[in-house]
């Protein structure tokens, strides 16, 4: 192919490249590069009185986020919910109109540069399976409930993360409350998801990729 270096998200992608004839010494499973706020180890969070759910769809607030929130009204217990609409201003305004008219303790935000802090404090992230969002969540040890409507690479992301026990993939939005109720009944499952997420995360992907590039340039 003419390329000297392949930095890939995971060893499984490395194996796929080797099978099509890419020399293994050119391939490094670095993870997907994420920004500096995600590089340091996550800070342990105190136990919260309510389950803290984070709903987000990347910087542009993509996916069935409002529909996902609406399903939470059928939960048996009130939760703390942080809803990040990103740059989707109409969605942000719609969700702000729900504050005070919902059973949950709802906070609605637009685009924020503090997403690492929100992920770190959340017990569960409800989101689409985009590469950056999932990589950021894994670096914080935040379990994922992955929304349906995945296509292409997002489906591959979802399968990989679920296979390693760090996420639950949904085929229908209406299944969200049922899955959350299951986690509430078995708190150890949520702990396991978090531990697996942290083990799968590659917070230093950007630095590792840069180091391999430097080695190549200096060789």
Image (tube, grey):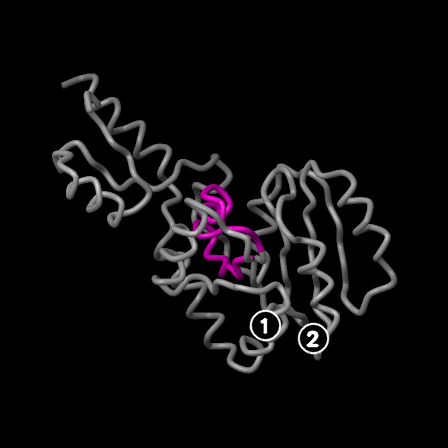
Residue 131 belongs to the span the image colors magenta? yes
Magenta-drawn segment: 127-147
The residue tagged 1 is 180
At 79% from the left and 41% from the top, the residue drawn is 90
Q: How many marks?
A: 2
Q: Is residue 118 left or right of residue 69?
A: left
The residue tagged 2 is 75
Quadrant holding the N terminus: top left
Q: Check whether the beta carbons of the residues at disc 2 and disc 1 lie within 8 A of each other.
A: yes
Q: Position of residue 18 (x, y in %)?
A: 15, 41
Quadrant holding the C terminus: top left
Q: Is residue 215 left or right of residue 172?
A: left
Q: Is residue 186 left or right of residue 173?
A: left
At 67% from the left and 53% from the top, the residue drawn is 65
Q: Position of residue 10 (x, y in %)?
A: 29, 47
Examine the image and state in which quarter residue 53 appears. Answer: bottom right
At 69% from the left and 36% from the top, the residue drawn is 87
Q: Callout 2: 10 Å neighbours few (<14), some, many (20+)?
A: some
Among the two numbered marks 2 and 1 on one chain, the one whose residue lies closer to the N terminus: 2
At 55% from the left and 60% from the top, the residue drawn is 45
Q: Callout 1: 10 Å neighbours few (<14), some, many (20+)?
A: some
Q: Position of residue 191 (x, y in %)?
A: 46, 70
Q: Is residue 211 left or right of residue 76?
A: left
Residue 154 vs 4, above or below: the answer is below
Q: Position of residue 69 (x, y in %)?
A: 70, 60
Q: CA distance from mark 2 to mark 1?
A: 8 Å
């Amino acid at each position: 192919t003419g390329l000297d270096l392949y930095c890939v998200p995971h060893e499984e992608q490395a194996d796929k490249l080797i099978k099509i004839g890419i020399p293994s010494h050119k391939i490094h499973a670095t993870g997907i590069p994420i920004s500096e706020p995600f590089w340091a180890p996550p800070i342990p969070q105190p136990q919260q009185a309510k389950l803290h759910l984070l709903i987000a769809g990347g910087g542009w607030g993509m996916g069935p986020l409002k529909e996902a929130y609406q399903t939470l009204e059928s939960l048996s217990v009130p939760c703390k919910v942080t809803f990040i609409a990103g740059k989707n201003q109409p969605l942000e305004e719609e969700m702000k109109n729900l504050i005070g008219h919902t059973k949950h303790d709802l906070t609605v935000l637009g685009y924020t540069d503090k997403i690492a802090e929100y992920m770190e404090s959340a017990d569960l992230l409800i989101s689409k399976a985009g590469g950056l969002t999932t990589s950021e969540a894994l670096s914080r040890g935040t379990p994922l409930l992955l929304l349906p409507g995945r296509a292409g690479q997002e489906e591959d992301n979802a399968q990989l993360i679920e296979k390693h026990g760090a996420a639950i993939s949904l085929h229908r939005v209406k299944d969200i409350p049922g899955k959350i109720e299951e986690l509430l009944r078995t708190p150890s499952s949520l702990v396991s998801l978090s531990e697996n997420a942290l083990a799968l995360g590659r917070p230093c992907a950007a630095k590792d990729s840069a180091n391999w590039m430097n080695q190549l340039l200096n060789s």
